[in-house]
Amino acid sequence: MSKEHIDEVSGVSTTGHEWDGIRELNNPLPRWWVWTFYATIVWAIGYMIFYPAWPLINSATTGVLGYSSRAEVRQELEAAESARGDYVAAVRASDVSEILADDNLRQFASAAGAAAFKVNCIQCHATGAQGSPGYPNLNDDDWLWGGDIEAIHQTIAHGVRFAGDDETRISEMPAFGDILEPDQIRQAAAYVVSLTGTPSNPDLAEAGATVFAENCAACHGDDAKGLKDFGAPSLADPIWLYGSTEAEIAAQIRAPKHGVMPAWQTRLGETTVKELAVYIHSLGGGE
Amino acid sequence: MLIKAAAAWAWEKPAKQASSECPPMNVTVKNPPSSEAVERLDAEAVNSAKIRQPLYAPRKKIFPKRASGSFRRFKWLIMAITLGIYYLTPWLRWDRGPHAPDQAVLIDLANRRFYFFFIEIWPQEFFYVAGLLVMAGIGLFLVTSTVGRAWCGYTCPQTVWVDLFLVVERAIEGDRNARIKLDAGPWTLDKVAKRVSKHAIWLAIAVATGGAWIFYFADAPSLLIDFATGNAAPIAYITVAVLTATTYTFGGLMREQVCTYMCPWPRIQAAMLDEHSLTVTYNDWRGEPRSRHAKKAAAAGDVVGDCVDCNACVAVCPMGIDIRDGQQLECITCALCIDACDSVMDKVGKERGLISYATLNDYNANMAIATAGGTTAIDPRWVRDGGKLSDRIAHFHLRKIFRPRTFIYLGIWTIVGLALLTALLSRDRLEVNVLHDRNPQFVTLSDGSIRNGYTVKLLNMIPEPRVIFVSIQGLPGAVMTANGIDQPEGRSLAIPVEPDKLRTLKFFVRQPARHVSRETQHFRFVVEDKASFETDEYKATFNAPEKRR
């Protein structure tokens, strides 16, 4: 510290610094400011005693109050869990049709199902459940394995053609490329298209009716509206899993693709699967 | 601090130069000029070391004397009204039926509703409050441009509560002189007792002030019981504690310092005054030259004004100023000095109004008379005709309030008010909001028909249950269903909605393929309460896939 310098005009000591002949007066700080400053020091000491403060090697001092933000989060999660507890217990105890009948329970399950859907299902069925080629749209009323709540629940719980589940939905359309002549396949495809649209060649379609009746009607039905027991899709509607053109249909007859869906019961548990079923059912196509 | 230092340096420099250039006193200079030849200036250094004050002056205590008179009575009345409104409002009841609270004024934050007698406001209608604030702002312009800082002097909570705290102080410690004496005196048992009881009552008032505040936010009677039994929410206790602290500190301890140092309002209001605005004015054109011995001076032939220099105006001032120094920032225009001076004028047999509400224009006109157009010092004889105040003296008249500026403020204030009123009276109590599903935009069903999903929010904004009919208008052939509503597909669904609640439903609108005309069709959701004939509608779009060509 340099020698104390007193400003001649004001008689106040200066800070001892000088900038181009300008000195800074060392006036006292406002009293309220000083006391506030002291108060913050007292506060800081108190804080160090009561709250976690000093970092140690592996952790930090815990403080007298034992506060921890992690514990607080845990508490909040537990509180949220217990607040949901009644509903969760009710979902667990009820079967899906009962959940559907109870307005409050349905709304809870549907909201929970929506959340579970966003995590587990959108990868194939897309965020709006509208599906993509090969993965069915869950919004419409065309169901491969049935669209009532029980059927939806069964499909989600045990999956489709899923090797690890004994109760999984299973069916397999033969590869008609090995059975039928290429002409017959073209005829069958033309016939199927004629059910909902305009085939490229009406004569082909006419001939295809016979091919269909002999080879396809057993699973897809005489009216081609499908049979849900076999997961055989309706061919008489405008909804197509693997494409709606004649070429795409012919390809599917020749060497069918078969989708696989995992069984979710073992992965997500009973409650979540019920919630998912209720959510899917609420998308508009539920029967 | 640096700025101050620089300023100090600016003063310092000439002084230094002077000291270095002036020869020392004891040095003899050849052929000194005659000291008579140098003109002596009558000057005193403004910041000379002798009279310089420290930059940090401690507060000087103010002991306002009790005033009495018409303005004091008016202030008592305003105090009673404002405090009455503040304390009693939460206890007023207003029957709204079984589905809504019966508290007349209630800010129900938990349920996001604001109740004001017959008005109920939902959060999205909060613009009414913004409109009221606009009106309050313009109303303040109006009031300030006409009667000056009336807000400060009469209705500001700071003024009202300081007045209340002063009542307590006077009741316990006595009036001005007794208080000064007590303050200066030693800490006797009596002084301790008085101080303790004063602060205790102040604190009690402060607690009551903070306490009343929370009743606006919950049902007052049940909250009072909860509060007293320790069952109220922590936020209630925190709020009361904070408001107790601020009330006690501002009203009891800081008082005039809040107005002078903390409040921006005096600056804003003072900027809105003009020469037509009423301010509390010392009429020095009749008061000066002031004299304590008017009769003796008059007998000696001196000119004396009406001011007897009794300092009554100073003693009553809660801001600690002397109004005779002219209009100043600290003056809150509480008009207590007018009361004090009027009673003195009565006693000495002069006309009232030596201190009065006056406009700058009137004051200047009267001043011109008293100084013969500014050519002389004030001579109060000019303003008198045979002992009476001259007829030429300008007085305030109500019509002087009405001038273009006032009418503009009044006009804007009225327009905003009418707009708010119109909006309030014509507002919907039944509303519908629709959010069209974007993912997916449409769904093709197995019969080829197209379905769109809509999240429909029905707002039943009255505290009664209602059945709201939701119908489709336009969109030929379309029918709809709603999740959770067990009714057959149709163009109109009856939806029950709970009182004062919003109901969110998922609606599915389906249009058969043969009716689908374009990719985007417009239609309306119409909601109707068949009992009250209230309706609302929402323009929606219906999307369909691109047609294959």
Image (spheres, rainbow, N blue to C red):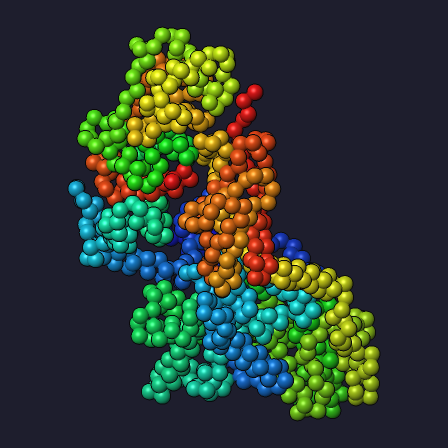
Specify whether residue A36 is in view.
yes
In terms of image quadrants, where is residue B127? bottom right
Tell how many labels: 0
Image-quadrant location for residue B31: bottom right
Outermost residue, left side: A58
The vertical placement of B395 against B19, above or below, is below
Residue A21 horizontal side relative to residue B187, left or right: right
Q: Quadrant of residue B384?
A: bottom right
- Taking the image as shown, residue B166 lies to the left or right of residue B345, namely left
Identify the image quadrant of the C terminus of chain B. top right
Q: Nearer the viewer, residue B113 or B70?
A: B113
Residue B184 percent across, percent down from the top left: 42, 82
Residue B276 or residue A204, whichever sits in front: A204
Classify B159 as above or below A282: below
In-front residue for pair A203/A109? A203
- Residue B33 percent across, percent down from the top left: 67, 57
Q: Which residue is at a point 54% across and 80% down the rendered structure image?
A: B80
**Residue lying at 40% horizontally and 62% vertically, measured from the top left:** A32
Q: Position of residue A231 (x, y in %)?
A: 31, 28
Left or right, A111 with reference to A269: right
Is B525 rendered above or below residue A174?
below
Where residue B87 appears, as percent x and y from the top left, is 48, 76
Residue drawn at x 37%, y 19% as measured from the top left? A213
Relative to residue A106, is residue B303 depicted above or below? below
Q: Residue at x 59, y 45 (%)?
A: B473
Q: Nearer the viewer, residue A161 or B57?
A: A161
Residue A20 visible within the image: no
